[in-house]
Image (cartoon, rainbow, N blue to C red):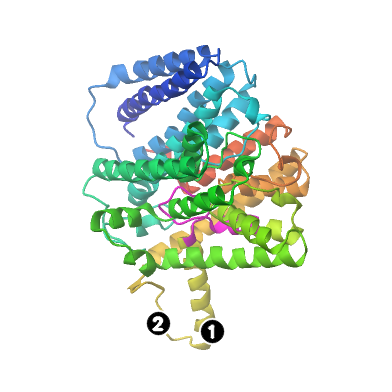
Amino acid sequence: MHFSVILRILGLLLMLFSISMLPPLFIGWLYNDNHLEAFGYAFAITLVTGFLIWAPVYRVRQELRTRDGFLVTVLFWVVLSGFGALPFLLHENPAINVVDAVFESMSGLTTTGATILTNIDDLPKSILFYRQQLQWLGGMGIIVLAVAVLPMLGIGGMQLYRAETPGPVKDAKLTPRITETAKALWYLYLSLTVACATAYWIAGMDLFDAIGHSFSTIAIGGFSTHDESIGFFNSPVIDTIAIIFMLIAGINFSLHFFAWRHRQLIHYFRDPEVVAYFVILGGVSLIAVLVLSVTGTYGFAHSIQYGVFEVVSIATTTGFSTTDFSIWPTFLAYLLFLTSFSGACAGSTGGGMKVIRVLLIYRQGVREITRLLHPNAIIPIKLGRKAVPDRVGEAVWGFFSAYVFIFILLFLALIATGLDLPTAFSTVASCMNNLGPALGDASMTYAELPDSSKWILSFAMLLGRLEIFTLLVLFTPMFWRR
């Protein structure tokens, strides 16, 4: 383990992260918030701490090993979530405790969107902007993690995404070096954000709301600058724009990279994961519209408007809302939560287990049924025209087993803290899938949950964002042996 290299990277990360305190500081000055000290102190504390960590080891030049990569990846979210909580702690409006500050910061950086804040419309503009910015920065970190880092670490079948060409089975990085990959992804991410903000602004949002909501839309985060979320604007046009960009952000960014580089779109329709992604969304949307219409929850037009929006928002794990889906027929509310388990595509900013894993599990299930009829047949699992290596299939099943087992443990832990069954189930599903909205006592906000529940759910957010194994491997004795 190269601790000096890890400390050097951590120090640089903190110094870079300190810069993120400056835009909210400017927004606070622009809107005359009168609470600028919080961001000023947070900037200074983060910058100085980062410098003190970096300075003793700044000359160290060593290659990172696989174990170092695991530790750096986990520290990225843990440490930045801790320092990201500083503005919430230091700000007088709202005045919140350590648990709530860390929860809100973790929720932002992991793009979960669960919040402990109330009366969001009345919060200072600086805090509102900072929450949106946290999700945007976290979303970009997720893209680099998913496309450039996790495939190298071999996490849960993500070896599939070591690619230069489109499609689910890929053999190399997007570009020869991770730094070039990250740069290309930044351009894509920034371009989509600008396009989304422009569309929102043209559709009727003011500039502040347009930028803020573009941050959380492209990051698939779900934080909003209003208590009513996207529903505040009561605009079918804005709803449609949100749906379009949520769908785009939920697709593997390596496919966007290919489309940008080669100026063509046909590869999207040839990718089995993207096809499955739209089949799932289309099927669940159809069910939602029919149920809402038949049960008389809304008229047919509003059933389409609200049904499609909520399905796309929940299934991609964004978490925006235009209506309170917790009052929908119970069957439909739980169907939406179950859909969030598949989530968006791998290599996107979305959460959940990822569509590619669900697709592989489905095809392996079909293969086992076929083998019952033809015991001696050799039946490879294929995605596109290529067979999936057995090692990838094993990793996917291992990931799925760990996901279910940990979900059950966290569910039981939340019940032990005093939560009722709907609240415990929906909050752990929401946080593990990096979704945000929940049912029961957390249908409006997580503020009333016990502190012990919030710590558990913060851990669930981190587990979901780091694809389970990245975090769990740190708890094994073998990881720390020389």
Q: In the image, 402: left or right of 167?
A: right
Residue at image coords 56%, 38%: 223
Q: Earlier in the sequence, mark 2 or mark 1?
A: 1
Pointer 2: what residue? 378
Q: Which mark is residue 17?
A: none
Is the Cβ of the residue at disc 2 closer than 8 Å to that at disc 1?
no
Pointer 1: what residue? 372
* Residue 234, image quadrant: top right
Q: Amino acid at mark 1?
A: Leu
- In this rendered view, identify the residue nearer to me: 246 or 86: 246
Density class for disc 1 (Cα within 10 Å; few <14, some 14-19, many ≥20) is few
Image: magenta residue range = 336-355
Q: Main secondary structure of the magenta part?
A: loop
Residue at image coords 78%, 39%: 418
The spot of residue 221 in percent (x, y) is 52, 42
Asked whether the viewer can see residue 293, the reply is yes
Density class for disc 2 (Cα within 10 Å; few <14, some 14-19, many ≥20) is few
Q: In the image, 305: left or right of 477?
A: right
Asked whether the viewer can see residue 388, the reply is no
Q: Amino acid at mark 2?
A: Ile
Which quarter of the image is occupied by the N terminus? top left
The spot of residue 474 in percent (x, y) is 46, 40
Secondary structure of residue under mark 1 = helix
The spot of residue 190 in percent (x, y) is 36, 40
Q: CA distance from mark 2 to mark 1?
A: 12 Å
- In this rendered view, identify the residue nearer to me: 392 or 228: 228
Residue at image coords 39%, 63%: 391
